[in-house]
Image: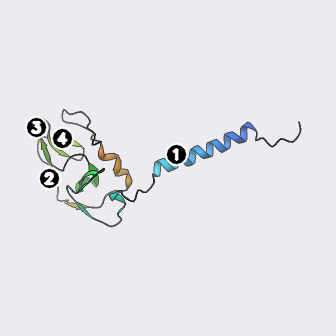
């Protein structure tokens, strides 16, 4: 068994696990996208602020959605925070700060009130 410059299988596995953890961590935390309005630290947004690629901002929910806040959809009801309800959502919150880039995921509706999921894409 002479000296070998090839790493042992166990060493390869350790590197691979570390790399996987680094990639997984990056996926969890995300990368800051300068065009993402949620990265505008300290900036308040009002209901129905629209940004292409992100959708409409719903201040009470601190996030982005594919339809305007409290928009009415026949047969479904009023849309707010990813769901439909028979009456408009009433909230004193009309301005708020977006919550990080995780808000990006909110562009997909969860559906509800007899609806199926909708995508803004």
Say which label, 2 or 1, has the lower sequence index. 1
Viewer-nearest of discs 3 and 2: 3
Q: Residue at x 18, y 44 (%)?
A: 79
Viewer-nearest of discs 3 and 4: 3
Q: Residue at x 17, y 55 (%)?
A: 91
Does the residue at mark 4 contact the one at mark 1 (Cβ under 8 Å)? Answer: no
Label 4 and label 1: CA atoms lie apart by: 34 Å
- Please tell me whether mark 3 sits on a helix, a strand or a loop: loop
Label 3 and label 4: CA atoms lie apart by: 11 Å
Q: Quadrant of residue 59?
A: bottom left
Residue 118 versus residue 65 in the image, above or below: above
Residue 33 versus residue 88 in the image, above or below: below
> Would you name the residue on which mark 1 appears?
24
> Would you name the residue on which mark 4 appears?
84
Q: Nearer the viewer, residue 56 or 89?
A: 56
Q: Residue furthest bottom?
A: 42
Label 2 and label 1: CA atoms lie apart by: 39 Å
Please give the label number shown on residue 90: 2
Label 2 and label 4: CA atoms lie apart by: 13 Å
Give the percent coordinates (x, y) of residue 33.
Answer: 41, 56
């Amino acid at each position: 068994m002479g000296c070998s410059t090839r790493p042992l299988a166990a060493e390869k596995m350790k590197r691979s696990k570390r790399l996987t953890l680094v990639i997984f961590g990056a996926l969890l935390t995300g990368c800051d996208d300068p065009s993402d309005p949620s990265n505008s630290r300290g900036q308040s947004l009002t209901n129905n602020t629209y940004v292409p690629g992100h959708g409409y901002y719903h201040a009470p929910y601190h996030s982005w959605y594919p339809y305007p806040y409290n928009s009415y959809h026949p047969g479904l009801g009023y849309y707010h925070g990813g769901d439909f309800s028979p009456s408009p959502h009433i909230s004193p919150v009309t301005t708020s700060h977006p919550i990080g880039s995780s808000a990006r995921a909110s562009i997909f509706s969860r559906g509800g009130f007899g609806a199926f999921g909708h995508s803004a894409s």
